[in-house]
Image (cartoon, rainbow, N blue to C red):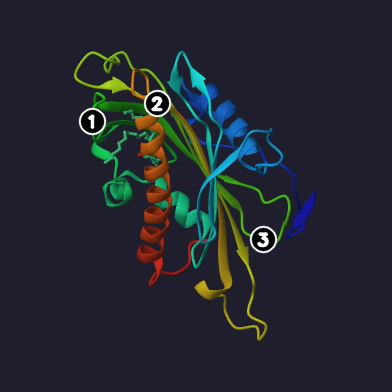
Amino acid sequence: ERLKAGKAIPDTPPPTSPAGQHRLWPEIDTLVKQQVSMARLGVGECGAGWQLFAEDGEMRMYRREEEVDGMVVDPLKAVHTVKGITGHELCHYFFKPEYRYDWETTLENMQVLETISDDTLLFFQTHKRIWPASQRDTLFWSHMRRLPNDQDRDGPDIWAVVNNSTDLASYPPNTGKCVRIFLTVCLLCQTRIDPPKDGAPISRDNITCKITYCSVVNPGGWAPASVLRAVYKREYPKFLKRFTAFVTNKTKDKPIMF
Ligand code: 16C
């Protein structure tokens, strides 16, 4: 336990969220904990079979080739390091619906179906069609969480967003023109501060963010394996570069949000 103003602060405060009373809460809390601990493992630590498929500057993307019922469901693990932005900023722009059209290039339409709480939303999205497959939609809860930094207690907190598919009776899957995609996504961001030697205030030049993005996407219905692998090889690097550039640009003249 550490002491702050003479008061003991427990090592692992229980994660509290106003979403606690919701029917989805037990699933959200369990899955967030699981996803965060998986994301914190390096590619060498979380089992064999990860292949590097894309690399650009500090960004590295790994996948494991997996199929379920003949459908490609290759898990992805991407790591990236970006200067000048914090984990809280990255998670904020990833989570908040008002920015999604600015960076999400696969999107055709997005609706927030339910505000479960400030940090937990239910989304319904339709995505752009890729020929020759049918158009896809997604229905998922999204939860943003601050986590204590147990490796460096004086360092900034860790932030994460987890998105996971769910069902809703009023939006049944595969009834219209879209096939429902099932996804589990985790964005985990750790900020490092290298304070200026002369004691000057911390500026954006002194911060670096280590990003881990993990995803498993089940296409939900037939799509040629070769097309699917070609699409994600192109789309994942495009997403991570575009999204981080968007956050860099959006925050450059704003106070740092730790
Ligand atoms: O995590 C990301 N975005 C979040 C907010 O939108 C959220 C949503 C994830 C949806 C991921 C599936 C989107 C695939 C739609 C179809 C592809 C359209 C391509 C358009 C080309 C003009 O978590 C960032 C997500 C980054 C997604 C990269 C693409 C992954 C492709 C996976 C294969 C999809 C199968 C499509 C079947 C034909």
Image side of residue 80 versus residue 11, left or right: left
Q: Is residue 58 above or below residue 229?
A: below
Which numbered mark, 3 or 1, is in the foreground of this view? 1
Disc 1 residue crowd, few under 14, some 14–19, many 20+, Cα 10 Å: few
Q: Residue 149, position in %: x, y?
A: 67, 51
Q: Residue at horizontal 38%, vertical 50%?
A: 238
Residue 225 — which label? 2
Amino acid at dot 2: Ala
Closer to us: 135 or 143: 135
- State which tag comes first along the sequence, 3 or 1: 1
Residue 155 — which label? 3
Image side of residue 38 versus residue 28, left or right: right
| Mark 1 CB lies closer than 8 A to ligand 1 | no
Q: Residue 244, position in %: x, y?
A: 42, 57
The quarter of the displayed image where residue 196 is located: bottom right
**Residue 84 seen in the current view:** yes
SS label for mark 1? loop
Residue 131 — which label? 1
Amino acid at dot 1: Trp
Label 3 to label 1: alpha-carbon separation: 47 Å
Q: Residue at horizontal 50%, vertical 30%?
A: 74
Q: Given contact means CB atoms under 8 Å apart, are the residues at marks 3 and 1 in contact?
A: no
Disc 3 residue crowd, few under 14, some 14–19, many 20+, Cα 10 Å: some
